[in-house]
Image: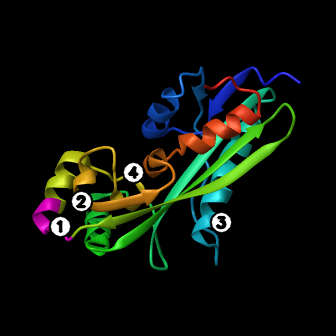
Amino acid sequence: MARPEKIIMASSSPYRKALMQRLQISFITINPDISESALPAESAPQIVSRLAREKVEKVAENEKNALIIGSDQVAVLEDCILGKPGNRSNAKRQLITMRDREVSFLTGLCVLNTQSGSSLTDVVSTMVSFRDYSDDEIEHYLDKESPFDCAGSFKSEQLGITLVKAISGSDPTSLIGLPLIRLAEMLRSEGCDIP
């Protein structure tokens, strides 16, 4: 069976769109417009897996011949889940909490083939060790980056990298919100021609 005629990124994120463009394949983006709230007693891996899957399923309601990609990310500090802060005061609070500590960033990924009905879901983890940065450094970072739409208020691809001691993980793009190594494997398994 031929692969579906189009590839859709179920996201309105400019970060994920920029990452997808690295694969040099034709795709479109559609905002899935779902609630991203956690369910009671849901673990971080369960949250990102479910939300990635719900995003593709929402877009699939109107797309019958497509490969649909969904992704979601949370940051986890000990047992506390850190999502998108939404505003400066929440971002500052998150960054103060993360100072001189290790935070796990979990990125859920789902690829759905609406032609065959097959789907693949995975969670990619990246561990970030933050350094003991100052309050002034937090303020400067927030002034320059406004990371209010990023899990854990952290944008590793920009000035946020200066807040870090070390990063450990299998896919550096996962930290930005879309694990391209795993995604390329999934797309190849669905017949996409990716080098």
Real-space Cα separation, disc 4 to disc 3, in angstroms: 21 Å
Real-space Cα separation, disc 1 to disc 2, in angstroms: 6 Å
- Which tag, 3 or 1, sits closer to the chain's start? 3
Badge number at residue 133: 1
| Crowding near the residue tagged with mark 2, few <14, some 14–19, many ≥20 C-alpha atoms within 10 Å | many
Residue 189 horizontal/vertical position (percent): 75, 35
| Crowding near the residue tagged with mark 3, few <14, some 14–19, many ≥20 C-alpha atoms within 10 Å | some
Q: Residue at x 40, y 53 (%)?
A: 150
Element type at mark 1: loop
Q: Which residue is mark 3?
A: 46
Do the residues under discs 1 and 2 have CB atoms within 8 angstroms? yes
Residue 36 horizontal/vertical position (percent): 57, 57
- Which tag, 2 or 3, sits closer to the chain's start? 3
- Which tag, 2 or 4, sits closer to the chain's start? 4
- Which tag, 1 or 2, sits closer to the chain's start? 1
Name above or below for residue 111 compared with residue 40: above
Real-space Cα separation, disc 2 to disc 3, in angstroms: 28 Å
Camera-nearest label, 2 or 3: 2
Residue 86 horizontal/vertical position (percent): 37, 57
Name above or below for residue 158 compared with residue 184: below
Q: Amino acid at mark 1?
A: Tyr
Q: Which residue is mark 2?
A: 163
Q: Amino acid at mark 3?
A: Gln
